[in-house]
Image: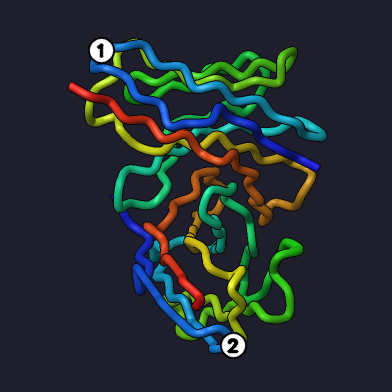
């Protein structure tokens, strides 16, 4: 079945450091890939997505490139801020289900703490 | 931005009791979902709901679980006889037609004692 593996946390960085959170996947078909973020006390929010190979999703300074050859979708940010402290989830959706289906497969989540 | 609202934020119950978790999806959304996350594990899909019926469910969603949209605004998840292993954070989500973006609520932490 489909699966997502992301790096274990927690990750602690100083402000302005470079961030990489690794994510690899296993899926049949051609999945769409997502990064969700959960700030303390809030629900999961879509951060960025990519729907086909070589697409780059970007938002709020975060980027991730859909790499089909390495089945990866690593999240990067050049300079993190304290406000980026949150839990980050990598997820995929495959398209072999019907239009109403939206079964996301998630990774375990990576907790990021950014210190001043 | 519009929000999905879940109540309560925390629920404590005794094993064998029934619980109902409540969600108010975004008003013009038509697709509704429940996910859960057991502590330290992955967020897992439970069920999707569209046009007043279940459109997809996972193996987790057995006969002890049910969903309902009783009044056109609320979307509920009922667990008939809770087990210790049902302790988890339960997330409700909704989606508009065509859009690929899921909007999640902040979750209900269920603790079964």
Q: Is residue B5 left or right of residue B35?
A: left
Mark 1: which secondary structure?
Answer: loop
Residue ID at (47%, 61%): B89
Q: Chain of mark 2?
A: B
- As drawn, which residue projects farthest toward the left? A116
Residue B36 in percent (x, y) is at: 55, 59
Q: Nearer the viewer, residue A10 or B44?
A: A10
The relative height of residue B60 versus residue A106 in the rendered view (above or below) is: below
Which residue is label 2 attached to? B16
Q: Quadrant of residue B53?
A: bottom right
Residue A23 in percent (x, y) is at: 59, 25
- As drawn, which residue projects farthest toward the bottom? B17
Measure the alpha-carbon separation of dots 2 and 1: 50 Å
Mark 2: which secondary structure?
Answer: loop
Q: Nearer the viewer, residue A101 or A19?
A: A19
Report whether mark 2 lies on the same chain as mark 1: no
Residue ID at (40%, 16%): A19
Which residue is label 1 attached to? A16
Dot in front, 2 or 1: 2
Q: Quadrant of residue A17?
A: top left
Residue ID at (44%, 52%): B103
Q: Nearer the viewer, residue B105 or B72?
A: B105
Residue ID at (74%, 13%): A69
Q: Is residue B30 left or right of residue A46?
A: right
The relative height of residue A38 versus residue B5 in the rendered view (above or below) is: above
């Amino acid at each position: 079945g489909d699966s997502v593996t992301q790096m274990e946390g927690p990750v602690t960085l100083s402000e302005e450091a470079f961030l990489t959170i690794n994510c690899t996947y296993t899926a049949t078909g051609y999945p769409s890939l997502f990064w969700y973020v959960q700030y303390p006390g809030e629900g999961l929010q879509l951060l960025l997505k990519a729907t086909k190979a070589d697409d780059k999703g970007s938002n709020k300074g975060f980027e991730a490139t859909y790499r089909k050859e390495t089945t990866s979708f690593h999240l990067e940010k050049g300079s993190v801020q304290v406000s980026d402290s949150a839990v980050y989830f990598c997820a995929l959706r495959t398209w072999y289900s019907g239009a109403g289906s939206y079964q996301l497969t998630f990774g375990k989540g990576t907790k990021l703490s950014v210190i001043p | 931005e519009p929000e999905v609202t879940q109540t309560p934020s925390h629920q404590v119950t005794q094993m064998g009791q029934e619980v109902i978790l409540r969600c108010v999806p975004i008003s013009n959304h038509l697709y509704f979902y429940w996910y859960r996350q057991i502590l330290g594990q992955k967020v897992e899909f439970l069920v999707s709901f569209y046009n007043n019926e279940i459109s997809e469910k996972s193996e987790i969603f057995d006969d002890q679980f049910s969903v309902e949209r009783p009044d056109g605004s609320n979307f509920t998840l009922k667990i008939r006889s809770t087990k210790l292993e049902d302790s988890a954070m339960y997330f409700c989500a909704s989606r508009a037609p065509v859009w690929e973006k899921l909007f999640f609520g902040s979750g209900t932490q269920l603790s079964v004692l």
